[in-house]
Image: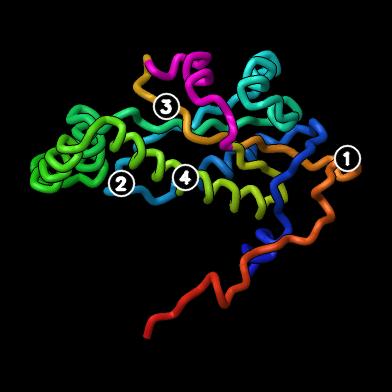
Amino acid sequence: MELLNALKWRYATKKMNGQAVSQDNVNAILEAAHLAPSSSGLQPFEIIVVTSSELKEKIKPIANNQSQITDCSHLLIFAAWDNYTKERINEVFSRTVSERGVPVDSMDDYKNRLTSRYSSFSAEQNYTHAAYQAYISFGIAIAAAAELKVDSTPIGGFDNAALDKLLNLKEKGLRSVVLLPLGYRDAENDWLVNLKKVRTPKARFIKELK
């Protein structure tokens, strides 16, 4: 299985060499992320792609001065909805019935149940749920990058509020979740590149119930 070989090859790249990732490869990674499953198909998040060196320099101190932010080719920012709203849910279902060519009211019962369910939760609870959906797409993007031999680094250690302010995400009804720099490893200067990949033993990690 090629995916397994790709996942064995990848690691959280600590030092990137600044080499550009082709737009075709970036598009393929984004398409994989776009096709990721999400709860009820709502896709309650967006992916912001940063290529501007100037903007990456501004983001770097927000992300604890991690060098991958400025040395990467493309920086993907996964940002989740700050809340589930009736308007957002209606928009998703309107698009779904239109693209499927089914009657406009054919999904109303399901849509109304979802709207009622999410309206019973706080905005913070709904953001947390939306962030979980973003992480599913994030994981698939990492796997897609690995298949293309594009390096990436999952980054959760950053000042979310500061990044949200820099990118005006609050005004867009979004909150940042996680970052994914894409690029190529600087093998000569990355201390992690040749270290053995270590995972929890499968006997402890996987439990079968029969």
Is residue 159 shown above or below 141?
Answer: above
Q: Identify residue type, mark 3.
A: Arg
Question: How busy is the neighbourhood of tag 1: few (under 14 within 10 Å), some, or many (20 plus)?
Answer: few
Query: Is 156 on the left or on the right of 44, as rendered?
Result: right
Q: Which mark is residue 135?
A: 4
Q: Does label 4 or label 1 sit earlier along the sequence?
A: 4
- The answer to whether residue 85 is magenta is no
Task: Specify whether residue 72 is in view.
Answer: no
Q: Which mark is residue 41?
A: 2
Please give the name of the residue rendered at 58% of the width and 38% of the height, measured from the top-left corner. 27
How far from the left and from the top, in percent, is residue 102? 16, 47
- Counting residues from the start of the chain, the first of labels 1 and 3 encountered is 3
Residue 83 in view of the camera: yes
Residue bearing the label numbered 1 = 189
Range of the magenta residues? 156-170
Q: Amino acid at mark 4?
A: Tyr
Crowdedness near tag 3: few (<14), some (14–19) or many (≥20) residues, C-alpha within 10 Å: many
Residue at the disc numbered 3: 175
* Residue type pointed to by label 2: Gly
**In the visual, does 99 lie left or right of 188?**
left
At x 66%, y 41%, the residue is 153
Badge nearest the viewer, 2 or 3: 3
Q: Amino acid at mark 1?
A: Asn
**Judging from the image, what secondary structure is the residue with disc 1 in?**
loop
Answer whether residue 162 is magenta in the image: yes
